[in-house]
Image (cartoon, rainbow, N blue to C red):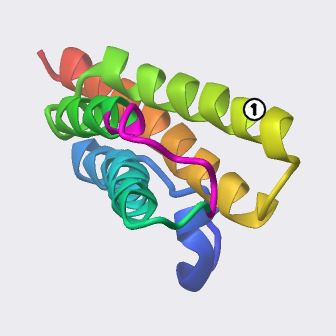
Amino acid sequence: MALPKNIEWIWPSIVDTTTAQKASKQGLWASAWCAGATIVFVVLAQFGSQMFNFDSSALLDAFLFIIIGWGIYKMNRIAAVAGLALYIIERLYMWSASGPKNPAIAIFITLMFINSIRGIFAYHKIKKAQI
């Protein structure tokens, strides 16, 4: 069942390699968001802001999300699964430390990583069937 076009990003239809690649790119954008937001919060923390207790060690997380994003761009299954796993682990850690904050964004980004996994695995399955 296809969703209306304006909300298909929630659970995109994957029928060929093109739609699989399109769905997988959601993980790339989720990784970019996670890396970018982390870098912004680290920079703010360096200037004295204590919004989320970020310090320079959080740059490792940003670096990991950049690497994961690159892997997703290259249609790597391990990178897609690692992106979801790292995001969930970090989200659980942050919520245990400071309580749940903005679960809507967490759900949104989690869906993006899930769609990336769906897209990448479907892409490889379709490519293998074409051989």
Residue 85's place in the image compared with 17, above or below, is above
Residue 23's place in the image compared with 94, above or below, is below
Residue at image location 35% in from the left, 15% down from the top: 78
Q: Residues within 10 Å of mark 1 (few under 14, many from 20)?
A: few
Residue at image location 84% in from the left, 33% down from the top: 96
Q: Give the residue number, with chain letter if any, for mark 1.
A: 92
Q: Is residue 49 magenta?
A: no
Q: Is residue 55 magenta?
A: yes
Viewport quadrant of the C terminus? top left
Give the residues drawn in magenta, as a range. 51-59
Main secondary-structure element of the magenta-colored stretch: loop
Residue 92: x percent and y percent?
75, 32
Residue 34: x percent and y percent?
43, 51
Residue 76: x percent and y percent?
24, 22
Q: Looking at this view, name the residue that lies furthest to the bottom.
A: 6
Decide if residue 102 is on the left or right side of residue 1: right
Decide if residue 101 is on the left or right side of residue 94: right
The amino acid marked with disc number 1 is: Leu
Q: To which quarter of the image does residue 110 belong?
A: top right
